[in-house]
Image (tube, helix red, strand yellow):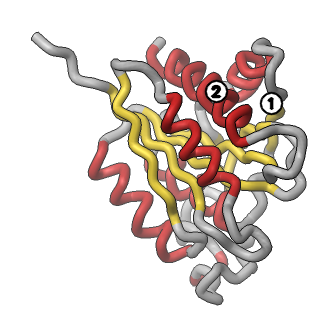
Amino acid sequence: MPTTKRTVLVTGFGPFGVHKVNASWVVVQHFAKLGLGDDVRLVVREIPVAYESVRTVIPSLWSEFDPVLVIHVGVSGVANDLTLEQLAHNNGYVLDDITGNCPEGNCCVVGAERVISSEIDMQDVCDSVNNTNKITAVTSDDAGRYLCDFSYYTSLYINRRRCAFIHVPTLDKRYTAEELAYGLKVAILSMLEQISS
């Protein structure tokens, strides 16, 4: 009897501001070529940098694919390394998205927790990436109070056990898109191992 493949959903973001080509989506596309092995169905999607899009698209992707793991990838102009975000914030979204809008009440989910942490051990994932000696990963407690943080909170609110957010640096820094994609693969395989145990 054939076994059902586990589905992993990985998202990147579209262009915004100075990021005419969003490094997160470039890295996710390179990562998709690497894959996660024959036993994993990999689904990748680009999400617009817009609060209302995130608010509708992310829950529908969870419903449509019932993934065992959801990884959101975003670009950070201040990051130099692969940055594993440990938590997301519900409030403080005062920066306009690409449509010129902010979420109502400047929050993600009205009346919900101020902060939600992922139950994935990000330090363990970080160690797995760093042990490759090919790319450096760090952990963070601040996903930025923009669409990255907003999307992460949206997913954590759905399932904090099976969700993570990874920031990649811009592609003019120390790593190529291919190197970042490799680091992303190592990180996601480590997460899959965690949630399977």
For label 2, the SS is: helix
Q: Is residue 90 visible?
A: no
Work out which quarter of the rendered image holds the N terminus and state it.
top left
Q: Residue at x 59, y 60 (%)?
A: 13
Q: In the image, is residue 146 above or below residue 84?
A: below
Discs 1, 2 touching: Cβ within 8 Å: yes
Q: In the image, is residue 6 above or below residue 158?
A: above
Q: In the image, is residue 11 above or below residue 176?
A: below
Q: Nearer the viewer, residue 197 or 175?
A: 175
Instruction: Please give left or right for residue 111 compared with residue 133 in the image.
Output: left
Name the residue at the bottom extreme.
Answer: 100
Q: Amino acid at mark 1?
A: Ala
Q: Position of residue 108 (x, y in %)?
A: 57, 68
Q: Residue at x 47, y 72 (%)?
A: 53
Q: Position of residue 179 (x, y in %)?
A: 73, 32
Give the CA separation, mark 1 to mark 2: 9 Å
Q: Nearer the viewer, residue 99 or 103?
A: 99
Mark 1 Cα shell of 10 Å, populated few (<14), some (14-19), many (≥20): many
Image quarter of residue 166: top right
Q: Which residue is mark 2?
A: 187
Q: Residue at x 49, y 38 (%)?
A: 32
Among the two numbered marks 1 and 2 on one chain, the one whose residue lies closer to the N terminus: 1
The disc label shown at residue 45, or none: none
For label 1, the SS is: strand
Instruction: Please give left or right for residue 180 compared with residue 56 in the image.
Output: right
Q: Position of residue 160 (x, y in %)?
A: 52, 40
Instruction: Please give left or right for residue 40 compared with residue 87 in the image.
Output: left
Q: Amino acid at mark 2?
A: Ala
Q: Which residue is mark 1?
A: 137
